[in-house]
Image: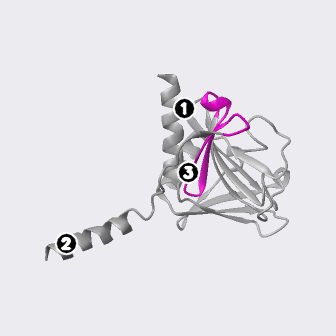
Amino acid sequence: MIGRFFMGAAVAGLFLGAGHAVAGEWFTHPFGELRAYHGDWLAVCDKKGEGRCRAVHSERKSADDRFFGKSRVALLRIDDDRWVIEFHDDGLSASELSSLAFTIDGETTQVPRDAWKVGTPDVDNVADTVTIMDAKLTGELVAKMRAGNRLIIDYQPSASEGKAAVSLRGATAVTDAIEAQIRDRTN
């Protein structure tokens, strides 16, 4: 009887912990960034942890592709107190974008046109990239991403499929790690 209890508790622990990624150790990358892997996400803080931090999920075109790849979602911590969401995809024509939607575990959020800008937060002329700048909307989307399992980003018009699939395994761990890094350097 006791053996069955412990076996049941172990099995329950496996299922309850299945959605959470174990936090990786921080290390200094040759680019001078502080980095840590968390599930399918990478935490990056510029200037050995003293600069701007971001969480990155990338889908590569091939094993040889080392940078932007097919698609990329980055959660950027701006001014250490709010998130913005940067999205890059090969088929995205950012300057012609007319619709953008985030679907997290079946729940769709339409992103209003006035909530995004073409390019990155700091540079407008970045191909195939848009950034959601609206603080309230990004706060809501990041909270949903932290609680979710899968994100589908739909956009139109598109030179290809108009969809990007993103695993959210590690989204909670990576955002927690970034927030802790920011707290540690400000204390």
Residue type, mark 3 in image: Leu
Q: Which mark is residue 72?
A: none
Residue 50 covered by magenta stretch: yes
Q: In screen coordinates, is 92 left or right of 165?
A: right
Q: Secondary structure at mark 3?
A: helix
The quarter of the picture where residue 120 lies is top right
Q: Is residue 182 above or below residue 173?
A: above
* Residue 126 position in % (x across, y down): 83, 44
Whichever of callouts 2 and 3 sits on the residue coming sooner in the sequence is 2
Whichever of callouts 2 and 1 sits on the residue coming sooner in the sequence is 2
What stretch of residues is rendered in magenta? 29-52
For the question of whether residue 143 can be seen, the reply is no
* Residue 42 position in % (x across, y down): 61, 49
In the picture of the structure, the residue carrying the numbered disc 2 is 5
**CA distance for labels 3 and 1:** 15 Å
Residue type, mark 2 in image: Phe
165 or 42: which is nearer to us?
Answer: 42
The quarter of the picture where residue 159 lies is bottom right
Residue type, mark 1 in image: Asp
Please, which residue is most extreme toward the left here?
1
For the question of whether residue 102 can be seen, the reply is yes
* Residue 168 position in % (x across, y down): 55, 59
Q: Is residue 17 above or below residue 134?
A: below
Q: Secondary structure at mark 1?
A: loop
Crowd band around label 3 with a 10 angstrom C-alpha radius: few (<14), some (14–19), many (20+): many
* Front tag of 3 and 1: 1
91 or 174: which is nearer to us?
Answer: 174
* Residue 156 position in % (x across, y down): 77, 62
